[in-house]
């Protein structure tokens, strides 16, 4: 990654990193999007079952895979400081951790899945689909976590176009297997929502194999000789990964789990409400890929700049990224407002679900601005390797402010299910304010430290 001087050069370099990440994130999210929309075409019960299954899986996956995201800033710092020989060991240690995390998830899920679903009070068919979806998905957990590490390596070097290629290659695979297993085409069993889990598991194996081949065969990745040397498990390396990764994972978990918690609390309502909520939250999450991708790009670029001791450049990149996120999120909010009927019709043809989804989408508009501020700042702070305060802010914003406010409004006012959405908006806004203050403190602290050294 080259050094930039002018603002124009920085915008061009940020865009070159960002665009492939955005396509990649949209592609990865499209797998969940396909699961949701294609299942909804079978029956609202299938949509609700996949919604519950996803709500249980997504916070677990994003939280634990978030631990592995620490590999990106670690490698970015090493490459920025010209310590390339230390990179392979970090990757291998990350792979060891990915296997351990996968095994833990499978064991915990085996013993806890039935009690969790049983105590949710779901309709029997919804519970059956949710359980089958998660069991099918579990066969792809191991490759998915391995891929998370490989992707961090590829992205940290700035070659985000490669992960974009992998994702775009996997999309037709996911779509085809969804079509075969959800609807039972060409002699395959018609599994409904459960088939979406089967298709996703197969896709996870495919993207992992593709990533491994590229790393071993293509430049510049093969020059790192990642798999040439056998590295023993290193608790020192694990500690470095976990020291940064655990706070990242927890902050992501706190954010994603509150959305999952709200969906689970929605189980007290009827299937129409669950399906409508899931459709609206699915689309809002789809648009969240914009600020999230900017966040990931900023982690890479800021990490390189900090590793090279270019604090001024890191700061400039930060504000360019935040400004871009605000602009794009404003456009997203406008799209939601003017195209609510069209968006709702993507997910369902059921008249009741169609109408209620449009009502939920009004509240999704207010997610956009908070996400546009909070997500990029999180990425910048990870580039600085400042992660501990961030996860505390996430805990307070989402679980101390957001969820209680939502519960009170849903339970004790006439807002009902919409009260939970107002709670989500409150939590996101609180997080955006706290992160903004933290970024100012960290940038000021780094500037003072640099002055003192010189």
Image: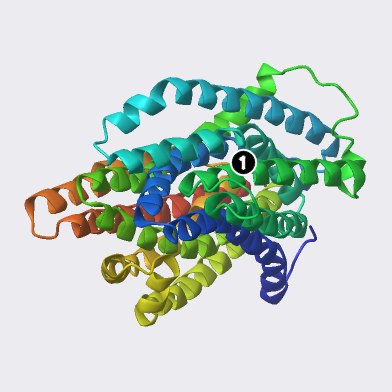
Q: Quadrant of residue 361?
A: bottom left
Q: Report the quarter where the N terminus lies.
A: bottom right
**Left or right of 316, for residue 172:** right
Mark 1, residue position = 201
- Residue at 29% of width from left, 41% of height from top? 399
Front-lying residue, 421 or 235: 421
Residue 49 locus on image (x, y percent): 38, 46
Q: How many marks?
A: 1
**Left or right of 152, for residue 106:** left
**Left or right of 371, for residue 106:** right
The residue furthest bottom is: 338
Q: Secondary structure at mark 1?
A: helix
- Residue at 66% of width from left, 49% of height from top? 303
**Colour setting:** rainbow
Residue 23 locus on image (x, y percent): 64, 63
**Left or right of 114, for residue 5:** right
Instruction: Tell me if residue 3 comes above or below residue 140 in the rendering.
Output: below
* Residue 247 visible from this viewpoint: no
Front-lying residue, 343 or 234: 343
Q: Quadrant of residue 339?
A: bottom left
Residue 345 locus on image (x, y percent): 40, 72
Front-lying residue, 364 or 352: 352
Front-lying residue, 126 or 187: 187
Q: Badge 1: few (under 14), some or many (20 or more) residues near its Cα, within 10 Å?
A: many
Residue 97 locus on image (x, y percent): 64, 26
Instruction: Tell me if residue 307 comes above or below residue 367 in the rendering.
Output: above
* Residue 418 visible from this viewpoint: yes
């Amino acid at each position: 990654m080259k050094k930039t001087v002018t603002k124009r050069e920085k915008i061009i370099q940020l865009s070159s990193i960002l665009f492939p990440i955005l396509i990649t994130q949209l592609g990865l999210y499209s797998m969940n999007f396909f699961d949701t929309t294609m299942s909804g075409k079978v029956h609202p019960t299938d949509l609700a079952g996949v919604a519950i299954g996803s709500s249980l899986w997504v916070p677990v996956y994003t939280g634990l895979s978030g631990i592995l995201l620490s590999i990106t800033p670690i490698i970015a710092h090493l490459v920025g400081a010209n310590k390339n020989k230390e990179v392979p060991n970090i990757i291998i240690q990350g792979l060891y951790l990915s296997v351990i995390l996968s095994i833990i998830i499978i064991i915990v899920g085996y013993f806890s899945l039935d009690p969790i679903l049983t105590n949710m009070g779901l309709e029997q068919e919804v519970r059956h689909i949710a359980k089958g979806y998660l069991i099918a998905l579990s066969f792809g957990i191991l490759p998915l976590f391995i891929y998370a590490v490989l992707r961090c390596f590829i992205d940290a070097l700035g070659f985000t176009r490669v992960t974009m290629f992998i994702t775009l290659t996997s999309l037709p695979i996911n779509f085809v297997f969804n079509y075969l297993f959800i609807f039972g085409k060409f002699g395959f069993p018609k599994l409904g929502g459960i088939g979406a889990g089967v298709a996703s598991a197969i896709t996870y194996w495919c993207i992992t194999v593709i990533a491994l081949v590229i790393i071993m065969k293509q430049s510049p990745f093969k020059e790192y000789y990642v798999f040439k040397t056998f590295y023993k498990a290193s608790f020192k390396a694990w500690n470095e990964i976990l020291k940064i990764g655990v706070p990242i994972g927890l902050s992501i978990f706190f954010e994603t789990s509150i959305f999952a918690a709200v969906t689970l609390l929605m189980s007290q309502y009827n299937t129409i409400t669950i399906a409508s909520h899931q459709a609206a939250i699915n689309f809002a999450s789809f648009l969240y890929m914009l600020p999230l991708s900017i966040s990931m790009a900023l982690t890479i670029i800021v990490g390189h700049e900090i590793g090279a001791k270019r604090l001024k450049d890191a700061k400039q990149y930060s504000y360019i990224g935040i400004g871009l996120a605000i602009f794009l999120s404003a456009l997203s909010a406008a799209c939601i407002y003017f195209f609510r009927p069209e968006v709702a019709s993507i997910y369902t043809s059921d008249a009741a679900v169609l109408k209620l989804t449009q009502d939920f989408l009004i509240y999704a508009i207010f997610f956009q601005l908070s996400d546009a501020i909070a997500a990029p700042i999180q990425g910048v702070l990870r580039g600085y390797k400042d992660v501990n305060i961030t996860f505390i802010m996430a805990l307070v914003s989402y679980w101390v402010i957001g969820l209680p406010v939502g519960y009170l409004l849903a339970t004790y006012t006439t807002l009902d299910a919409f009260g939970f959405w107002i709670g989500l908006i409150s939590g996101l806004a609180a997080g955006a304010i706290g992160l903004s203050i933290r970024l100012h403190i960290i940038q000021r602290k780094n500037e003072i430290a640099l002055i003192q050294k010189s």
